Amino acid sequence: MGILNDEGIKNVILAGEIIHRIFKTIENMELKGMKTVELNDVIHKMIIEHNGQPAFLNYRGFPKSACISINDEVVHGIPDNRVIKEGDLVKVDIGVNYGGYIADAARTFIIGSVTEAVARFVRLTKEALKKGIEKARAGNRVSHISRAIQEFVEANGYSVVRELTGHGVGRSLHEEPMIPNFVAPGPDPEIRCGMALAIEPMTNMGGFEVKTAKNGWTILTRDGSLSCHFEDTIIILKRGFLNATRVAEG
């Protein structure tokens, strides 16, 4: 369980700033008609131009710099020659290493027009991230975050993925504590000042069950329903928190 010193906090903030800039750029891009590998290349180039390193590239063998997942793909989509189409939900997950410290964030982009039901699903998943972040305070427990996300998501008729969790971040991409999006049995660590937490609700319009694709990486909904993903890296301060990646605020 890492507690960041001042240098660590500074570098996680700088890593988060790179991610924030990338998402602002993607917001203004025409993604429809673009291959996911082309979007990956834009992200990779921007990370390098800002003196960062892509934290996902070669992590446990992952072959690209970003995870780009479409529709029923929950997370860990591998960028390739697939073309982004009208009506797709495109989830972009980016990790950046700056000076030996990592920030991690994700956003779901709606491509063109979708039904109000789908738009609501995306809107409320983003709201679930905000609900979780509000509980990320020194002295609270991880379960405060988990409960806030689960209760909000399920009250609105969706499910939270249970086989994947948020996590600590900082020196490594995945650190303790794990941050489930549901109240899980077992240890319930206290949130402490100096922690960096990647809070990331992964929600499905259908059931919470998932499966792994043949590529060994991509996680899909088992029932084929749409999935949504938002994530921010939060640094816990003596009073309140600092949102290093600001996806929830965008």
Image (spheres, grey):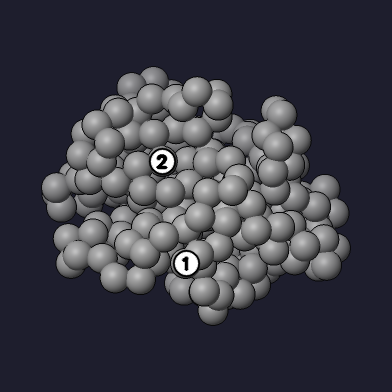
Q: Kindly identify which residue carries mark 2.
A: 73
Q: In this figure, what is the number of numbered marks? A: 2
> Is 85 left, or right, of 175 in this rendering?
left
Quarter of the image for residue 134 reads bottom left
Q: How far is disc 2 from disc 1 in space, using C-alphas?
A: 18 Å
Of pointers 2 and 1, the one earlier in the residue sequence: 1
Residue at image x 34%, y 28%?
210
In this view, the residue in front, 90 or 237, is 90
Where disc 1 sits, the SS reads: loop
Residue type, mark 2 in image: Glu
Give coordinates of residue 33: x percent, y percent: 50, 65
- Vertical arrangement, residue 200 with respect to residue 118, above or below: above
Report the side of 59 relative to 212 (left or right): right
Counting from the top left corner in percent of width and height, residue 235 is at: 59, 56
Q: Position of residue 158 (x, y in %)?
A: 20, 45
Mark 1 crowd level (few <14, some 14–19, many ≥20, 10 Å Cα): some
Query: Which of the pair 188/108 is nearer the observer?
Result: 108
The reply to whether residue 151 is visible in this rendering is: no
Name the residue type under label 1: Lys
Q: Which residue is mark 1?
A: 32
Residue depicted at 35% across the width and 42% down the height: 72
Locate residue 109 relative to residue 23 in the image: left or right: left
Badge 2: residue crowd in 10 Å (few <14, some 14–19, many ≥20): many
Q: Residue at x 53, y 41 (%)?
A: 77
Q: Residue furthest bottom?
A: 28
The N terminus sits in image quarter: top right
Mark 2 secondary-structure assignment: strand
| Of the two numbered discs 2 and 1 in the rendering, the one whose residue sits closer to the viewer | 1
Residue located 36% across and 64% down the image: 86
Q: Viewed as shown, does residue 243 lie left or right of 207?
A: right
The percent coordinates of residue 48 (x first, y second) are: 82, 61
Question: Quick one: 149 or 54, which is closer to the camera?
Answer: 54
